[in-house]
Amino acid sequence: MQVYFDFKDYRVKRPIITIGAFDGVHLGHYEILKSLCTTAGEKEGESLVLTFWPHPRMILDKDNSIKLLNTLEEKIALFEKAGVENLVILTFNKTFSDLSYSEFIKTVLVEKLNVFHLIVGYNHHFGKNREGNYDKISEYALTFGFTSEKLDVKYIENVKVSSSLIRDALLKGDVDLANRQLGYEYSITGRVIPGDKIGRTIGFPTANISVNHDFKLIPHNGVYAVYVTVENKNIKGMMNIGVRPSINSDAKLTLEVHLFNFSGDIYGKDITVHFKRWIRQEMHFENIEQLTKQLNIDKTEISNILGE
């Protein structure tokens, strides 16, 4: 896949284009990407995704509090996995957000990208104040000589697929719903940092993780069944997200994962945690013995889940 961050070296033959923020690159997005690639083949053109970074809501939301499902690196990898041939990533800032829909179509889609055919989702809006829609696209397609189409909404088990729903599900600990809508297991990548090493004294050494991006969504507090990618190997494990009320009282959020049947020094290395299932809420224990007993129960349950 060819990735462009500007138009300087842009060379695409008969570009078949879709546009969007694509946070999550979920199954609804995948339907668009599948149609994009199929149409590119039929029209003897090249598939092209036009997306934006930072996410528009990170610039336009007044409180700037949105948490994202993907980092830019993750999103690029998901586009490539979907078979997209070309990816254009434009910097989204206040100046760009002030472009009217007509200016966007004329200067970006037509003059810069030389659009041949445009595919958008069922509720696509664009341009200043989101005033552009498919009716406007159809009108300008006639003016500038390109074709266009709009795709229907995607449902999974009678539930509309959306990035917002996936975010809400993860914030409630509903990993099953989130993963079904994503079409893959939600993950976070972070660097292993030193902890207080209490876990190793009770037989549950953990890797404490510092997430690489502060805008990345962290799922609901609790214990999870996970797979962990460490140096290109997938290892079963259990993860705790929370404030560890049995250990300290400073209420600082920690992310720590216990890797099953693993030994090795991974301090300072990046690892990726893939969430399989939420097990239980974080709990307070009166003593280390109670904590250790529960951790053994959790490990047995998670081993059964991951062994399926």
Image (tube, helix red, strand yellow):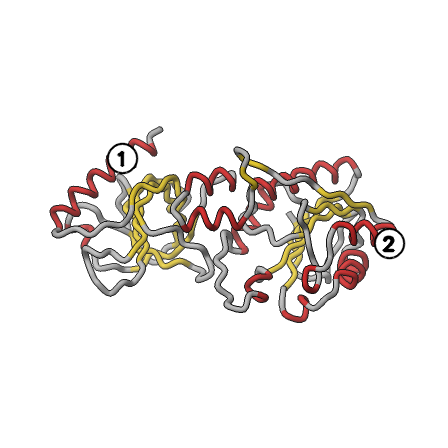
Residue 248: which quarter of the image? Answer: bottom left
Height in image: 185 above or below 127?
Answer: above
Disc 2 marks a residue whose amino acid type is Phe
Secondary structure of the residue carrying tag 2 is: helix
Disc 1 marks a residue whose amino acid type is Glu
Label 1: how many residues lie within 10 Å, few (<14), some (14-19) or many (20+)?
Answer: some
- Image quarter where the C terminus lies is top left
Separation of residues labelled 1 and 2 (CA atoms): 60 Å
User: Whole-percent x and y of residue 251?
Assistant: 27, 63
Q: How many marks?
A: 2
The residue positioned 29% from the left and 47% from the top of the image is 281
In the displayed orientation, state which residue is furthest to the front: 158
Residue where numbered disc 1 is placed: 301
Say whether residue 201 is left or right of residue 177: left
The residue positioned 37% from the left and 57% from the top of the image is 191
User: Whole-percent x and y of residue 156?
Assistant: 54, 35
Q: Nearer the viewer, residue 239 or 73?
A: 239
Residue 130: which quarter of the image? Answer: bottom right
Say whether residue 122 is left or right of residue 147: left
Residue where numbered disc 2 is placed: 144
The residue positioned 83% from the left and 54% from the top of the image is 140
In the displayed orientation, state which residue is furthest to the top: 308
